[in-house]
Image (tube, grey):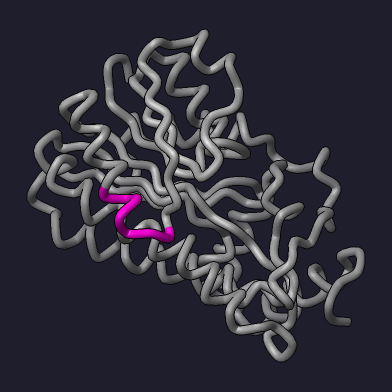
């Protein structure tokens, strides 16, 4: 990864921040894109090749500027990691539709915008296009209609881009972490669009963002098409192929046990 130019959206926290540090330690030139900007000075101590670009991925113009600034600074793009995302927790019957629209704008359309403007440069470098999806992109999670919908859409989009460019040297990775220790659940949206404020899970028992980042980088190095993380995640995907009705009940029961679950 030494010398590679890597764009990471949602780079200010969670998996995105961990990816920025992982690539910086490996000698890559990191373009850190986020709405709030990079606030950790340690990242700049690791590498002088850091470009901090304030980006709201829900705005097409911001995504276009992100790509332009990367080319102006480094002249190429080797890897684009579409990581920016938000979550939610609310029953569909009760949720404000604006919440689902907000999730689609960030998780799906933000990826589409960035990919559209970066694609010519990724094709030129025969680089890697990465989408940080979720096990929720394989199995619908109750209480997360907008989140699951956005991740299913992401995976379908990336599969098509992979097939369309099958003979052009483009590598496309769909990375699906399981539940990961990060702040995504703390800032998840409730039914009225306000922040949930606290996580319903025991974060200490989850895979760390740093470990997820290491696995994603390894998958990029090996040119893998898919990466499914955690034993629970792999079992969910496997069993859902053969026993979907059984998994419906299992997922329902698992999610119903969450503290303050919206359904019983």
Q: x%, y% of residue 91?
A: 73, 82
Residue at 59% from the left image edge and 54% from the top image edge: 234
Q: x%, y% of residue 262?
A: 83, 77
Residue 229 located left or right of residue 104: right
Quarter of the view holding residue 103: bottom right
Quadrant containing the C terminus is bottom right
In the displayed orientation, state which residue is furthest to the bottom.
93
Quarter of the view holding residue 12: top right
Task: Determine the main secondary structure of the stretch shown in magenta.
Answer: helix
Q: x%, y% of residue 104?
A: 48, 70
Q: Is residue 168 magenta?
A: no
Q: x%, y% of residue 79?
A: 29, 36
Q: Is residue 15 above or below residue 238?
A: above
Residue at 33% from the left image edge and 31% from the top image edge: 6
**What residue span does the magenta drawing correspond to?**
58-64
Q: Is residue 59 magenta?
A: yes
Residue 136 located left or right of residue 206: left
Q: Is residue 80 above or below residue 261?
A: above
Residue 16 located left or right of residue 179: left
Residue 206 located left or right of residue 96: right
């Amino acid at each position: 990864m030494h010398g590679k130019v890597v764009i990471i959206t949602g780079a200010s926290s969670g998996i995105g921040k961990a990816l920025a540090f992982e690539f910086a330690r490996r000698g890559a030139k990191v373009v850190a894109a986020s709405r709030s900007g990079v606030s950790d000075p340690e990242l700049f101590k690791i590498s002088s090749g850091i470009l901090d670009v304030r980006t709201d991925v829900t705005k097409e113009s911001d995504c276009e500027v992100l790509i332009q600034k990367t080319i102006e600074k480094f002249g190429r793009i080797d890897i684009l990691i579409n990581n920016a995302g938000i979550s939610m927790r609310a029953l569909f019957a009760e949720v404000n539709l604006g919440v689902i629209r907000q999730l689609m704008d960030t998780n799906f359309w933000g990826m589409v915008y960035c990919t559209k403007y970066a694609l010519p440069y990724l094709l030129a470098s025969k680089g890697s296009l990465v989408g940080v999806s979720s096990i929720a992109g394989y199995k619908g999670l109750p209480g997360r209609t907008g989140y699951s919908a956005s991740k299913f859409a992401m995976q379908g989009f990336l599969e098509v881009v992979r097939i369309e460019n099958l003979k052009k040297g483009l590598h496309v990775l769909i990375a699906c972490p399981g539940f990961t220790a990060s702040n995504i659940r703390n800032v998840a949206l409730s039914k009225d669009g306000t922040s949930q404020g606290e996580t319903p899970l025991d974060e200490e028992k989850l895979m760390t963002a740093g470990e997820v980042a290491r696995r994603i980088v390894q998958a990029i190095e090996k040119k893998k098409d898919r990466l499914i993380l955690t034993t629970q995640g792999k079992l969910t995907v496997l069993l859902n192929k053969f026993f979907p009705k059984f998994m419906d009940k299992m997922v329902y029961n698992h999610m119903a046990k969450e503290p303050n679950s919206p359904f019983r």
